[in-house]
Amino acid sequence: MQSYETVQVEDQGDGLVLATLNRPDVANAMNTQMGRDLLALFDSINADPLAYRCVVMTGAGDKAFCAGGDLKERQGMTDETWQAQHLLFERMIRAFIGCPVPVIGAINGAAYAGGLELALCCDFLYASETARFALTEVTLGIMPGAGGTQNLPRAIGERRAKEIILTGRPFSAKEAFEWGMLNRLLPPDQLRAAALETARRIADNAPISVRQAKHSIHYGLQMDLASGLMFEIEAYNRMVPTDDRREGIASFNEKRKPVFKGR
């Protein structure tokens, strides 16, 4: 796989990828290069989804998933440079959200500001019991601009999201779990293994089925029910003529594990 300056990408076999935000000396803060690296990573996955089955994203070290934008790099930026950098981040977020392959977040520590926005782009999240979260942008004279005002309310509801975003106040992993933002809360030393185990289970399933189901859930929730049901059937019909559909039925009747090829 391609190597990146700020993101460590490890092939776990059978289409499973572990992507680690890798700037531990600065709490994995997102600088311009990390924006470029994440954009390139998701562009490569989006361009060849058949090569991948599931991605796990985490942070290097045990203190932080991502502390947000690198404010030292931003010190003294002109308005034009700031907006150019943010456009890069916007493109990266769109590529991330548009990824057809499932992405599981393994949140190993603090996920603040842009770091929480990155986490919220994942399809679902596991987190360490010691993780902390915040969207602190309004305390810095800006606002969430990488999906935070859209993805957080969808995860925990409008009223709670307004309190978090408008105060900038941090919240705990326990609160995030109770509010439905996290799927699982784990001891720090079990987090990565648990996320990879779930990713492996997803990767074992029929990849076209997984991609179509993700697509149907994501876009269907943005429609009225009748339109969503029509969208679901269009997604479903994509699988009827596939070899994987035939393999799934054959393996069930032959009482063996299916071997899916993604075609």
Image (cartoon, grey):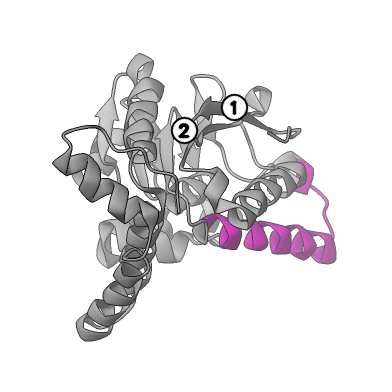
**Which SS class for mark 1?**
strand
Quarter of the rendering containing residue 211: bottom left
Quarter of the rendering containing residue 146: bottom right
Instruction: Return the x and y of residue 238 as percentages of the image width and height.
Output: 37, 68
Instruction: Return the x and y of residue 15 as percentages of the image width and height.
Output: 50, 36
The residue depicted at 42 percent of the width and 66 percent of the height is 150
Q: Answer whether residue 142 is visible to the viewer in this image.
A: no
The residue depicted at 30 percent of the width and 47 percent of the height is 247
Magenta includes 202? no
Instruction: Return the x and y of residue 20 as percentages of the image width and height.
Output: 57, 30
The residue depicted at 66 percent of the width and 50 percent of the height is 44
Q: Earlier in the sequence, mark 1 or mark 2?
A: 1
Residue pointed to by mark 1: 10
Residue kind at label 2, given as amino acid type: Ala
**Which SS class for mark 2?**
strand
Residue kind at label 1, given as amino acid type: Glu
Residue 239 in the figure: left or right of residue 12: left
Q: Identify the magenta region.
A: 73-96
